[in-house]
Image (cartoon, rainbow, N blue to C red):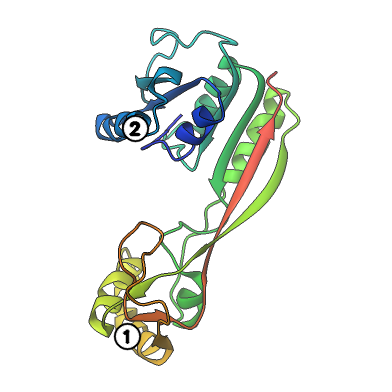
């Protein structure tokens, strides 16, 4: 659920698995179709335009209709309990979700702490664990550290990008942010080379690696 452009669905089909790939965005499903066609796996993917709050049974997802149901970094709903219950209902063997462990992945907590900015911590993974226990499941939790290497071509571009972290209450920390970035920008030895998304890397990088932490929760359907 929340398959996006197929970053997990396509590799699974390339390994020979059939996948029901659901997302609430038609644009994402169109990108998925392109990726499936490129890798010649379209016959193994069943795309579904589906949101968390939709009627999954009406969309053809009956109880115990798939072996494994998972949502990786894609639970976008106001009713976490209902979302987990839907995954549980459709799976025969296993359910898995990945939720942010600390703050939103748009924050660099190293920087936010250094400049004295306040950040609301996410506890969705704790809520999810407790909800699952209440449902009668025995959830298992492990943690994923995802390194992010941001690169830029100028101080102004760096400030403009990171200033988004200051929205909703920390705008007054912009001078501290600028000063921190100016002091911690270093030359990128891989400038011009393709980055993670294929675009050329910028001339500068920060002297630390941004780490995004996720909680991976798995359980046997009840």
Whether residue 198 is visible to the viewer of this picture, yes or no, is yes
Give the numbered dot on residue 32. Answer: 2
Q: Quadrant of residue 218?
A: top right
Which residue occupies the foreground of this view, 213 or 55? 213
Which residue occupies the foreground of this view, 41 or 18? 41
Report the residue at 29% width, 74% height from top: 171
Report the residue at 56% width, 30% height from top: 15
The C terminus - image quarter: top right
Q: Nearer the viewer, mark 2 or mark 1?
A: 2
Q: How many marks?
A: 2
SS class, disc 2: helix
Mark 1, other Cα within 10 Å: few <14 / some 14–19 / many ≥20: some
Which percent across, then down, holds residue 211? Answer: 54, 65
Which percent across, then down, holds residue 62? Answer: 51, 8
Give the numbered dot on residue 55. Answer: none
SS class, disc 1: helix
Which residue occupies the foreground of this view, 170 or 66? 66
Mark 2, other Cα within 10 Å: few <14 / some 14–19 / many ≥20: many
Image side of residue 139 versus residue 78, left or right: right
Which percent across, then down, holds residue 107? Answer: 43, 65
Image side of residue 106 versus residue 95, left or right: left
Q: Considering only order in the chain, which callout, 1 or 2, is on the residue closer to the N terminus? A: 2
Which percent across, then down, holds residue 63? Answer: 56, 9
Report the residue at 44% width, 82% height from top: 115
Q: Quadrant of residue 40?
A: top left
| Residue ranking furthest to the right | 138
Whether residue 126 is visible to the viewer of this picture, yes or no, is no
Kindly report the distance in space between the C-alpha atoms of the residues bearing marks 2 and 1: 39 Å
**Whether label 2 touches label 1, CB < 8 Å:** no
Tag 1 residue: 178
Q: Quadrant of residue 221?
A: top right
């Amino acid at each position: 659920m929340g398959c996006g452009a197929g970053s997990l669905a396509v590799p699974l089909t390339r390994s020979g698995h059939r996948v029901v790939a659901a997302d609430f965005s038609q644009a994402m499903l169109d990108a998925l179709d392109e990726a499936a066609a490129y890798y010649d796996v379209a016959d193994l993917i069943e795309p579904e335009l589906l949101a968390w709050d939709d009627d999954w049974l009406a969309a053809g997802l009956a109880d115990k209709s798939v072996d494994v149901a998972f949502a990786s970094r894609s639970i976008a709903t106001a009713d976490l309990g209902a979302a987990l219950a839907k995954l549980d209902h459709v799976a025969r063997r296993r359910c898995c979700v990945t939720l942010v462990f600390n703050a939103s992945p748009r924050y660099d907590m190293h920087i936010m702490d250094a400049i004295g900015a306040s950040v609301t911590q996410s506890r969705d993974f704790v809520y999810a664990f407790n909800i699952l226990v209440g449902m009668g499941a025995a959830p298992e939790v492990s943690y994923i550290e995802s390194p992010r290497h941001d690169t830029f071509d100028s101080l102004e571009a760096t400030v403009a990008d990171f200033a988004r972290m200051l929205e909703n209450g920390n705008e007054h920390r912009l001078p501290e942010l600028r000063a921190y970035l100016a002091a911690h920008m270093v030359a990128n030895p891989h400038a011009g080379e393709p980055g993670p998304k294929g675009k050329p890397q910028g001339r500068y990088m920060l002297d630390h690696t941004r780490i995004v932490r996720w909680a991976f929760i798995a359980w046997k359907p009840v």
